[in-house]
Image (cartoon, rainbow, N blue to C red):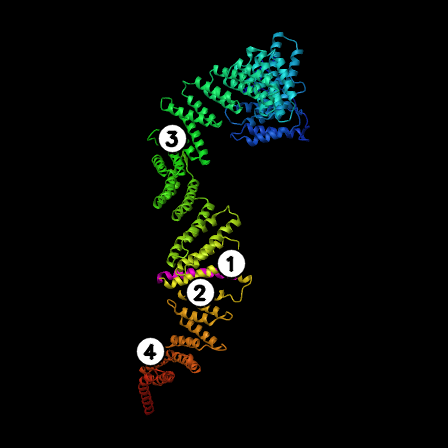
Amino acid sequence: MKAHVFQSSRTFILLTSPSGSSSSWTSFAVLQLSIKQTAPKSASEVLYGGETMNMEQFVSTVTCFIDNLLHKQSTDYDEVIEKLFSEVSGLKGFPKIPDPQLEECAIQLWNWVVTKNVGSTISTTQKAKVRHAACTLLLCSEPENPTEGVIRKQILMASKTGRTWLDCKNPQMADNFLRFAVKSLETLYGQLTSRGGAASDNASSKDDVEKDLLRVLSCQAESVSSLQALSQGSNQEAVVCMQRCKDMLLRVPKDTAYLSLMCYNFGIETYDLKKFEESAFWLRQSCEIGKMNVKYAPGLEVQAKVLRLLAIVYLEWDCQRFQEKALNAVSLANKECVSASGLYLKIRILLRCGASDDHIRAGLNEMLESKVSLELCLSTVRLLMSEDRETLGFEYLKRVCQHFEAFPELGTALVLHIELLLQKGKELLGKQKIEDVITGHYTGKQLSPQALTGLHVLLWDKASKHFEARNHSEALQWYNYSLSFYKAGQMEPNLAKLQRNRASCFLQLKQLDKAKEAIKEAERSDPDSIFTQFSVYKIAVLENNVEKAAEAVRAIGLLSRSPAAREDGLLVSENAASQLLSLAAQIALENEQHETAMKALESLCEISEDGTQVLTALRCLVRLLLSTIEGSSDEMRNGTADVLLPYLRMALQKVSRQCHMTVEQRTEEANWFRKIAWNSALQCKSRPDRMRDLFMLSYQLSLLCPPDRTLLMSQKTCLLLAAAALLHLCRKSPPSDQAEQLTQALEYIQICGEVWRTLKATGSSPMDRTDTLLLLYEFEARAKLNDPKAEAVLESVLELENVETKVLETIAALAMERPAHFPLLCKKALRVALSLHKKQPQPDPASCSKCVHSLIQLSLPSGVSEMEARVLEEVWDYYEEALSIRTTAPENFPETETLWLLTRAWNTGVLLYSLAQYHEAERWCGLAMSFIRHLTSLQESYQTQMSGLYSEILDRLDRAKRNLLEE
């Protein structure tokens, strides 16, 4: 039987042990055991990871893993394979473990991995690990005098394991197995050589061994070459392996192509690593091996490919030093098998070597004669230009155009010709060439779509450069060249873009009518472009057409939010629209059209996602708005506040959401808008609602700044004034709105109180009236909400040091101001105020009289049901107080106040008289009569009116007394 030959291709090999007395072996389904059953030896130890390990324990562990792997039903073998590989890899070298169970495990494991070759049940790395384990176990179980069959089995398993590790790009793991395979093959060859027997069978076996040795040596060369590439080995060792392979080719000629291609691959790997000397060596080896046997060598195309790569290696290694070798290599490649890449490479080498124009011209002629593609010819032209062979380049390009004149792709060459002329500064010749192309385009020599697109790009680029250089007439000419290729009535987005660019040139040239015509064409081609609308806007601004400009701004905003808005097939980003609106505002300002500028900035704020850009736009809006109210009326200022408010609210939103801002940037922005809100609030004296909103915005913006005492003072003031404005607004609001407003005012007061407590903790001025104002505002809100806590607030006021009488009088008034109704709290505040007035070194009679007046008015009964002795007695005391004040300071006591006191006392007496309470009636009427003497001009009149009735009261009182005595 013919011995099995190890193949380099990754075919799946199933092994069998030798059968009968024959020394040959071949591939069968599975490996068969052919081992003499011997009694197991006593337990011994093996070296494992630098330490000793019990042999029986090792065999037991490995057997357990293998059984688990063989009987595992699922496809998840990762964990078991890793454990088995780790266990076997711990063995140092291939220690002898004479256990028959170990060889059985190795063969079972090998056969298992062979069955997994079909499909992707396990990965290549997993196959390598399993083969590694199987081969190691087999080598460890080797008998003292292995038979030829055992050696062949070891060779096959070691070589296949090494090959699999190479396929996994792990030459380090492969190297040991390949070395073992080479050593075993040499041993086997020696045995065959020294053995007698039939000469033909022996020669056949030796030939098979030589073939196997050649393949294993080539794999070893690949392994050591890869290790050398990783700086882990010597290239000389790979050279030695390959030299042995070359020596064997005389006996095994069929592997000539295999070895040649392997050397070529080594050349590619070393070239990629920029190891040019080694790459050149392997490529030369590939060529030499290919020449050893023409019959079995690679094809001419492959040999030409090797030679071209060799030429490239010489070119990049040292062109001046190896120019002759590079030229010889590429010339030989073109001789073996001419190709476009070979011809191009030859021109490239000639240029790098500084060859004369004649030599290069000969190479160019060879290229044209070889019928290469137009694309390669044009690439060659570009190469010539890049190497400063301008004359030769234009000459060759002219010949190329003539050579390919009948080809439809000729337009590509014409466009390149124009491009090169413009690059070399030959603009006049370029224009002549363009005009020729335009003429040809309309006389049957149309450019291909690709070439035409390239030409448009060239023309627009040239126009753009002239426009940037402010040479607008020249820019317009280049745009007009591009326009010449469009048919009348043609509609496409690029045409709209071209018309917009032409309009920009016309505008710079002050040709407004022509610019309008161009924009009309752009609108016809692409009306839904933000850039078209921007051009419409520019013309509207120049014509001072505010309405048209506003429409264009709105259109830009709407189109930027529409997913269908596209430009050149790309979705127009909101950023592009934002930039256009920013530019639109600038254009309007330059033309002193503030209203239009504000429209553009407002639209920018609506669509922009850039917080910094929005804040800048808001600053501009605020400045523009405030500039319009200088010296204006209060009514106009109030209207401005309505417009300003949304700007500030948007600023608050943007500043609070800008995560990318530094603390300093956030503070600067917040402070700027905070001060604007503060100053604007102070201008809204006639609009408490707007004053409240602006002060609260100022407070909210201040929360975005690092706190300090100055900022806390500002927050406190904002909250106080916002609460005051809200209370003022409440007084004018319908009853249905008051509860909500008062509740909100209490919230402001509560927050302000917290800020104030923080401030007081750092020290406060004794003259600060914040505590008083907070209590005063809180009392008003709670009183008008009919909150019983109003009494507690009054108590807090009374606990203040140096409470002012004016505060108490205000509280008294608030306690009775609708919808509040707290008469007891009112009287309490008035009594304390009166007491404080009287304690003054020089009491103010007017103030005292005012307090007494209010107390009497609150206390006097208004009906029969309220005529109680306690109430009357209280009022009597207030009258006595009033009379005392009147007597003490008659000159400071108005006659109208005296008349009021007289009238109220007299009316009380009359009411008591009507109730038949004559005694009390006489008392109160007598009190009223006592005030008559304090009257001046009205004394006589009131004396006459009151005397008669008073006499009648006294008569009634006397009769009542007599009746009482008679009874």
Q: Are marks 2 and 3 in contact (CB under 8 Å)?
A: no
Residue count near mark 1 (Cα–Cα under 10 Å), binned few <14, some 14–19, many ≥20: some
Q: Is any atom of residue 299 visible in this view?
A: no
State the residue lying farthest toward the top.
199
Q: Amino acid at mark 4?
A: Val
Q: How many angstroms separate mark 1 from mark 4 (CA)?
A: 56 Å
Label whose residue precedes the other's in the sequence (3 or 4): 3
Task: Tell me the number on the disc at residue 712.
Answer: 1
**Distance between the alpha carbons at the discs numbered 4 and 2:** 37 Å
Among numbered discs 2 and 3, the one appearing first in the sequence? 3
Q: Secondary structure at mark 4?
A: helix
Residue at which label 3 appears:
483
Secondary structure, mark 2, is: helix
Foreground mark, 3 or 4? Answer: 3
Q: Disc 1 residue type?
A: Leu
Q: Which residue does the numbered mark 4 point to in the structure image?
A: 864
Mark 2 vs mark 3: in front: 3
The region drawn magenta spans 734-758
Mark 4 or mark 2: whose residue is earlier in sequence = 2
